[in-house]
Image (tube, helix red, strand yellow):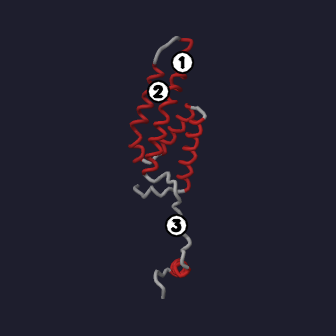
Amino acid sequence: MPTDNNLLTATGQSMYSIVMTTALSRLLVKDYEGAWDAFIAIYRIMDPECKKECKAIYEDTTTSLINIGNEQTDLYFIVYETKMKKCEYLSLKLWDILEAFSTSLYNKGYTVFVSNRPQTRRSDPKELELMLAKAKYGKSEET
């Protein structure tokens, strides 16, 4: 059902905030697998329009990680080497993913860095009085 989803509820804001914070903090401490898991979560809860913009980089990363896992090496070190190669790949790729995801969310208005709270006080006392009268009595003009 179509709605004006650019106005996030507190739940939506909280979800983006928690998952973006998790992704960024894990990325900064070099927990690349944990950061990738957080970016997967962001991609899954992302707005459909943002998802379209980020689909190429997400699918490219997923495909590359699968291909790294399919490489055959020495039987004893296959798990270790695969994990190291994936971490090396993610250490470079996740910064591009962070930029793509955050830019898309910002451009759609989901991560606004300025207050969108309505102004509650007017500089002129007369305007404040009119605003309160309108809110209380539903009148838009002075009577």
Q: Residue sitting at 58 percent across and 32 percent down?
A: 30
Image quarter of the N terminus: bottom left
Q: Which mark is residue 118?
A: 3
Q: Residue sitting at 53 percent across and 16 percent down?
A: 78
User: Where residue 79 sits in the image (x, y, percent)?
Assistant: 55, 19
Mark 1 sits on what residue?
81
Upstream in sequence: badge 3 or badge 1:
1
- Looking at the image, is 2 positioned above or below residue 104? below
Upstream in sequence: badge 3 or badge 2:
2
Mark 2 sits on what residue?
65
Using the numbered discs, state the Cα–Cα distance from disc 3 to disc 1 in whole angstroms: 55 Å
Left-right relation of 28 to 60: right
Using the numbered discs, state the Cα–Cα distance from disc 3 to disc 2 in whole angstroms: 46 Å
Q: Which mark is residue 95?
A: none
**Circle 2: is it few (<14), some (14-19), or many (20+) Cα within 10 Å?**
some
Upstream in sequence: badge 2 or badge 1:
2
Element at badge 2? helix
Using the numbered discs, state the Cα–Cα distance from disc 2 to disc 1 in whole angstroms: 13 Å
Left-right relation of 56 to 45: left
User: Where residue 117 sits in the image (x, y, percent)?
Assistant: 53, 63
